[in-house]
Amino acid sequence: MRFIVVLITLLLLIACQSSDEITSKTVEMYNGTGDRVGTAALNETAEGVQIELTLEGLNPGFHGIHVHEYPVCEGPDFTSAGNHLDPEGNEHGLMHPDGAHLGDLPNIEADGAGLVDVELMLPEATMLDGKNSLFGEGGTSLIVTENQDDGVSQPSGNSGARIICGVIAKEDEDGESEDAPTDPTEFNEDQEE
Ligand SMILES: [Zn+2]
């Protein structure tokens, strides 16, 4: 048992020392009045960045969802987040022949109770370094809109007002990194026992 504890601690230390790379992150989602309404769990995978999204309090039906270029969610309108994330200079829309923005995602559907529980994929994005990184220049943000995205209209698919926003950044707003290493002194104590 002690071996396992030491091993896990070692793995954590190695994971944290290899770089400041983060390959999973839980984003807190807030509505325009600042209430927390769900989470988006991001994971780096071989197919892109996977997003496990759970939300509550939406109007039933379809809503647009996009990654935006700035990690700033200032309600109630969230214009602080800028445009859709688009490092390639593409047109908007998953159905546009010259699309899509890197941050364009398929619409999500809220059930009759206003709940969303869905898995999404950003196939071209990464949580690692690079042009398509979600963490580039301080981060990005994930925004849900009032209406569905029609997939072709510029610049954002006629998707209406921005109603929910979450900051995608390596560090949370309190400055704490989610993957902060465990106290190294614990490791020493485990060894000496
Ligand atoms: Zn777009």
Image: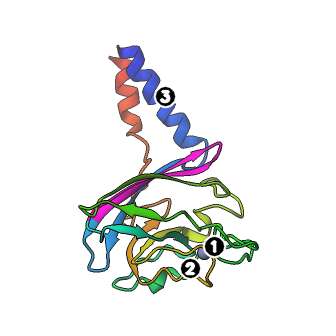
**Residue linked to disc 1:** 93
Q: Quadrant of ligand 1?
A: bottom right
Circle 2: element type: loop
Q: Residue 75 or 117: which is nearer the viewer?
A: 117
**109 in relation to 70, above or below:** above
Question: Given the image, on which type of amino acid does mark 2 rest?
Answer: Gly
Q: Specify the quadrant of the image occupied by residue 31.
A: bottom left
Asked if disc 1 is less than 8 Å from ligand 1, the answer is yes
Does the segment drawn in magenta span residue 34?
A: no
Mark 2, other Cα within 10 Å: few <14 / some 14–19 / many ≥20: some
First in residue order: circle 1 vs circle 2: 1
Q: Specify the quadrant of the image occupied by residue 18.
A: top right
Q: Residue 103 or 184: which is nearer the viewer?
A: 103
Q: Residue 36 or 138: which is nearer the viewer?
A: 36
Mark 1 in CB contact with mark 2 (< 8 angstroms) = yes
Does the segment drawn in magenta span residue 40?
A: yes
Which residues are the magenta region? 37-56
**Residue linked to disc 2:** 157
Quarter the N terminus occupies: top left
**Residue linked to disc 3:** 10
User: What residue is shown at x 28% (from left), y 65% (from top)?
Assistant: 37
Circle 3: element type: helix
How far from the left and from the top, in percent, is residue 26? 41, 54
Residue 60 lies left or right of residue 159; in this view the side is left
Question: Given the image, on which type of amino acid does mark 1 rest?
Answer: Gly
First in residue order: circle 3 vs circle 2: 3
How far from the left and from the top, in percent, is residue 149? 52, 74
**141 in relation to 159, above or below:** above
Question: Given the image, on which type of amino acid does mark 3 rest?
Answer: Leu
Q: Main secondary structure of the magenta part?
A: strand
Circle 1: element type: loop
First in residue order: circle 1 vs circle 3: 3
